[in-house]
Image (tube, rainbow, N blue to C red):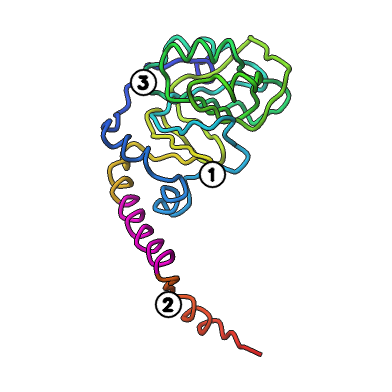
Amino acid sequence: MGTVGNRTRVNTTISAKEETVQRLAKAPVANIGDVMQRLYSFDAGLVPLNSHRLCGPAFTIRVPTGDNLYLHHAMDMLSTGEVLVVAAEGSSRRAITGELMLQYMATKNIGGVVVDGYVRDLDYIKTTCPYPVYARGTNPNGPYKNGPGEINYPVAIGGVVVNPGDIIVGDVDGLAVVPVAEAEAVANEVEAVMAKEASIIENITTKSEFNRPWVAEQMSRIGAVHI
């Protein structure tokens, strides 16, 4: 039997500079998504379950519906700042992780957990968990532990592809992934957008002005009329 679907790989991908990660951590996810042409944001079903902001390199796992054997294996491999990204087929049938595992991962000083599926022990996640957790919801039913799975291979989650080492950024609006090779360029672009928006907000708050010449241009282009 082949190893595809039942394998673990030591992550040897390139890493973004820590300075770049910190720059992205300060940017709204909406702005990050905009500068990447709105193609790299996760779907709205993945929501924050506490108020912590998320930013860090992805540690990817793929598991079958309702099974977390490979997640248990992966927990011992996590490093400081990494974001555990679990492709769990979006299933609502069983929780993939809960308080005991999340507490153990807290000792690793990880950057957060993103589960394309369900979790449990929401009270711990909301009140005590020291890092951000994103998921599709909660379910009290626990998982099976049979396997198979994959660790540190590309995964599809929330409608986008995540490679090991890509930067995952999350806030109250949701999540986006920044390909690691593009992280520096995206950081530069998003900082320019943030500076431009700060200027627009200043005009709105101090002058009650919101200059948008493109609105009139587009209205004219589509032939809009006032009656």
- Residue at figure coordinates x 28%, y 37% from the top left: 20
Residue 145 position in % (x across, y down):
63, 9
The image's mark for residue 213 is: 2
Of 77 and 187, nearer the camera is: 187
Magenta highlight range: 189-206
Q: Is residue 78 magenta?
A: no
Residue 109 picture quarter: top left
Q: CA distance from mark 3 to mark 1?
A: 29 Å
Q: Residues within 10 Å of mark 1 (few under 14, many from 20)?
A: few
Q: CA distance from mark 2 to mark 3?
A: 48 Å
Q: Residues within 10 Å of mark 3 (few under 14, many from 20)?
A: some
Q: Residues within 10 Å of mark 2 (few under 14, many from 20)?
A: few
Mark toward the start of the polypeptide (2 vs 3): 3
Element at label 2: helix
Residue denoted by label 3? 11
Q: Is residue 106 above or below residue 187?
A: above
Which of label 2 and label 3 is nearer to you? 2
Residue 8 position in % (x across, y down):
45, 15
